[in-house]
Amino acid sequence: MFGYLSLIEDIYMKKTTKVTLISLLIFPGAGHLILKSYLVAFGFIASVIYILIGFIKDVHDKSQQVIESIIQGEVPMETSAITQALIEHGVLDNTNLSIIGYLLVIIWLIAAFDAYRLAKKEMIASKKDKLIV
């Protein structure tokens, strides 16, 4: 009898797996929304959006400088020359942008791990409640 219940539980995705995958594959903090941990979800979502906006703005500004150089005729309309100009302006080869990328990955992983931790904590609490009743 108990083996049958275990099999049914294994067929359906556990909450810990679901919130972890949602946080990893959709957006950091999305798993927290499912767990109704809204403040933590807002923190993760806001931090990632803030970093992404800064990242996009930085790349846009530097790319705009290269575009203006092309329009003014300072950079020829050749792929190699444009690539070199992008490298010189720090669009393609920029350590700050690499650091921002790593920071995004770290926040993303922390959000997924925290969603897993909260779901596991919730599952343990619900099992304790079932044992008490």
Image (cartoon, rainbow, N blue to C red):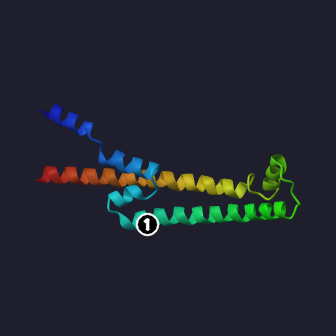
Depth order, front residue of 65/31: 65
Quarter of the image with the N terminus is top left
Horizontally, is 54 left or right of 107 in the view? Answer: right
**Residue 4 rendering spot, x and y as whole percentages:** 16, 32
Horizontally, is 31 left or right of 94 in the view? Answer: left
**Residue type at mark 1?**
Phe
Depth order, front residue of 12/81: 81
**Residue 100 rendering spot, x and y as whole percentages:** 63, 57
Count of marks overlaid on the render: 1
**Residue 24 rendering spot, x and y as whole percentages:** 45, 49
Q: Is residue 66 above or below residue 112?
A: below
Q: Secondary structure at mark 1?
A: helix
Residue under the image location 30 percent in, 42 percent down: 13
**Residue 74 rendering spot, x and y as whole percentages:** 89, 60
Residue under the image location 77 percent in, 57 percent down: 90
Horizontally, is 8 left or right of 119 in the view? Answer: left
> Furthest-right residue in view?
74
Residue under the image location 46 percent in, 66 percent down: 43
Q: Which residue is mark 1?
A: 42
- Label 1: few (<14), some or many (≥20) within 10 Å? some
Residue under the image location 48 percent in, 54 percent down: 110
